[in-house]
Image (cartoon, helix red, strand yellow):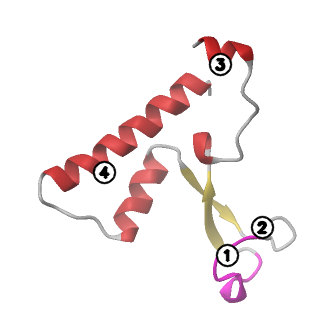
Amino acid sequence: MGRRVETEKLIEFAREMCRVAFDGGDMDGWEIQETAERYGLIEAVRYDPKLHTNVANAEYCRPGDIIYVFAGPLASPAPVTQKDKAE
């Protein structure tokens, strides 16, 4: 997925969060997580203590449990290239 598409997904997620607030509503953590997953900003993976060294509440996780990690534009950032700066 290209950087432009990832940025568009991040913007749409932010807009959806703001629309909820503008409409006087609110979202709980689960709803925010579901929305972030729908936009490809987080993803469910199987917990592996060797790979996932910085997981909140890891003391309650067993290998193979489902955890959520950042994905898309929220994952570890790639270096910005001159082409990215031109876009």
Task: Answer above or below: position of 48 versus 84.
Answer: below
Q: Nearer the viewer, mark 1 or mark 2?
A: 2
Percent coordinates x, y for residue 81 in the rendering? 74, 21
Which residues, given as a range, are shown in magenta?
A: 54-63
Can residue 80 be found in the magenta stretch? no
Looking at marks 4 and 3 on the same chain, the residue that comes earlier in the sequence is marked by: 4
Residue at image location 58% in from the left, 54% down from the top: 43
Percent coordinates x, y for residue 6 in the rendering? 54, 32
Type of the residue with mark 3: Asp
Residue at image location 45% in from the left, 52% down from the top: 36
Question: Predominant secondary structure in magenta?
Answer: loop
Task: Indicate left or right for 81 with 66 as reference.
Answer: right
Q: Are the residues at dot 4 and dot 3 in contact (C-beta closer than 8 Å)?
A: no
Tag shown at residue 65: 1
Which image quarter: residue 45? bottom right
Looking at marks 3 and 1 on the same chain, the residue that comes earlier in the sequence is marked by: 1
Which residue position holds label 3?
Answer: 84
Looking at marks 2 and 3 on the same chain, the residue that comes earlier in the sequence is marked by: 2
Tag shown at residue 52: 2
Q: Are the residues at dot 4 and dot 1 in contact (C-beta closer than 8 Å)?
A: no
Residue at image location 77% in from the left, 77% down from the top: 63
Q: Nearer the viewer, mark 3 or mark 1?
A: 3
**Seen from this angle, which residue lies furthest bottom?**
60
Give neighbour class at mark 3: few <14, some 14-19, many 20+ (Cα, 10 Å). Answer: few
Which residue position holds label 4?
Answer: 17
